[in-house]
Image: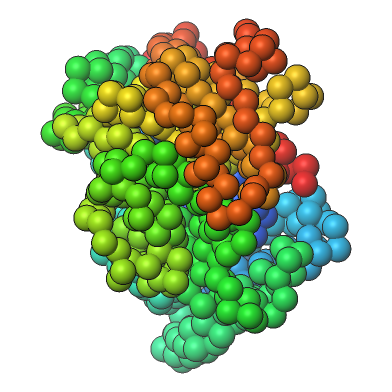
Amino acid sequence: MKRVYPYLVGFWLACLQTSLFFVLQISLSSAFLSYGVLLFGWLLGSAVGVSLTPRQARLWLVVSALCPYGLYGVLHFFPYRLEALPLVGLLIVLCSIFAGVFFQAEKSRFEKIGRLLFWETAGFCSGLVAALAVLLFLGGLTLAAWSPAGGLLLLVFHRR
Amino acid sequence: MTVRKPSLLLLAAGFNLVLIQLLIVRELSITLFCTELVVMLVTLGYFSGHLLGYALYHKVSERATRAWLIFSLLFHLPAVPAVRILSAWLAEHNHVGLARVAVFLFCSLFLTSFYAIFLPRIIDSMEDRGVALAGAYRAELAGGGMALLCGAVAGARFLEAAAVSYLFALLVIGWSLKFSLRGLTFLAVLAGLVLARLPQFDQYSSNYFYNHYYGWFEQARVIHSEHTPYQKIEVVEERNGERYLYLNGLEYFGAGSLELFNYYLSGVPGRIKPGARVLIVGSGSMSSLNHLAPSVSSITTVEIDRRVAEVGREYFAEFNRLEELKVPWNLVIDDAKHYLANTTETYDLIIVDIPAPYYLQTGMLFTREFYQLVEDRLSSGGLLSIYLPEFYIPGSEEGKIARPILAAVGVVFEEFLVINADDAERSFVLAGSPLKFELKGLLDAINHQGRRKFQLLSHGHEAVAEDLAGVEPASFNNLRVVWELTWWAARQ
């Protein structure tokens, strides 16, 4: 179980990132700006998250799972409007805070931090493949609709 | 492991990791015929390198780390042109599958694993792992952010800027690993040698790649090469002076069949819509302008990548004849979806001249949703002109790519007509709600430069209706055409 949880988190984060990128491309713009906002927002959110107290990890997991729907809502009401970018960026930062908090919360379970990084990255690789497969065979909207909420399943595996 | 300024080391490692992701993943993907599938494969290689680093970091001695640094300094950057040559050689000898495995292993073992050893090492070496993790992780992320900024600021000189800064970051890591002054001088000399020889090696390998990977070039040379935020743009010139435009290693324009491509895609609809206000989505060589100019009243080109338009203007003047253009022409740098959704202009003819759906990004422009955006901006009686990435023959076993695209057109527009042009080796589609032109006018437009061999298929044709019945249109939720095309490319 010690290894399964970081693996699943990595898997989910890859699906979440792919979903966000897909939705930004179809509803905002495929220009580099979308990619840049997603990447910068994610880096910033992770950096903030790793500085927070690990006791709030569950809260941030729920925030990460729900925020994408807020982002979809913004893009639904303001499709292809770059004016929505600041709000979109803020929501991406909120989505990614868990990616940082998670490491703080899990570090004590691993004698060597490399093990934690290893399993999270292994999950991330699998998640990238799975997300692409879902996108190509079941559809991008299907991926975007289900993958954020899928994070709530992680609550089952999360231990205080 | 004791290091000087751990945060600086991690900043440099994060910087180089993102540079690898931005540039080298793209370069390696190009050597394998860059499709969504190949990008995924190389990306997996990139992260597998991290896995290797995380698995081995506590077993690598300080001495070995220093040796690894020297190795990285010497071989990381030259490895890209070397892989290009290797990949072309393997492809020439029908070992493309082997080439993919080799590149995958290369990425995993040599590129990213070196940088992945530092983060866990530094955190493990600190007493308070919570504080160490926060600081170390933030430093690595900040390095990644700096590399992104470097990409945004460097513009057309990104490749050169990236090479210099990549080696500089390795020198910073060397300093942090406590190399002596003599050791650092040695590293700097090595970096200088790599930098001095890299441009020639890169040029040689690019020329080698095009002459050996693709079977149709002889003594061709790359006369322009640059990375933009979207793609790698290359102009290849043959011995006889003919030029070809490659985007991410995929042919986008060339004299010959691709010139005929523009004839059918732009010239023909331009002739049946005299005086039209035209929008072209995608620029490339911009030779569409030359085909359209004699018959239309104004042209707007929307292109996501400014540099593609500028390179087309500079290197393909003989085809686009921009200097002689008599009609008003407007270039808009924007994403086509974003432009169509926000413009208030309407057009009599919209031409979609974009690369084939080898990636999700271009796949999205072959969908029902995109055609709806186009339809909303067409004037009454307006016309859409697109191409299909494969020949469309109703009832044939093939057509997994053409059918969903055609079905998507059929959902949005009342009528469409497929032109199967043998000489252009493609199918083209004209669509409208309804189509407002005479068949004779179309035949005259196709044959105005001499008799051509082609076949027309109308949406009402029994075989077409039967063939498309039950086909799920390409849409944002059905991008299987991308898979079909990349899988087709992988089998070639």
Instruction: Report whether B201 appears left or right of B116.
Output: right
- Depth check: give the residue in front, B466 or B440: B440
- Depth check: give the residue in front, B377 or B148: B377
- Depth check: give the residue in front, A149 or B405: B405
Q: Is residue B414 above or below residue B21?
A: above
Residue B302 makes an appearance in the image:
no
Q: Is residue B422 above or below residue A139?
A: below
Residue A105 in which image quadrant: top left
- Depth check: give the residue in front, A160 or B242: B242
Instruction: Report whether A151 appears left or right of B240.
Output: left
Q: Position of residue B305 (x, y in %)?
A: 35, 54
Q: Position of residue B362 (x, y in %)?
A: 47, 39
Q: Is residue A73 above or below residue B75?
A: above
Residue B80 in which image quadrant: bottom right
Total tally of numbered discs in the picture: 0
Residue B447 makes an appearance in the image:
yes
Q: Position of residue B471 (x, y in %)?
A: 62, 13
Residue displayed at 78% across by 68% down = B89
Instruction: Report whether A44 appears left or right of B106.
Output: left
Residue displayed at 30% across by 71% down = B323
Q: Is residue B398 above or below residue B328?
A: above
Q: Position of residue A144 (x, y in %)?
A: 42, 19
Residue displayed at 51% across by 67% down = B234
Instruction: Report whether B417 appears left or right of A95.
Output: right
Residue displayed at 72% across by 76% down = B218
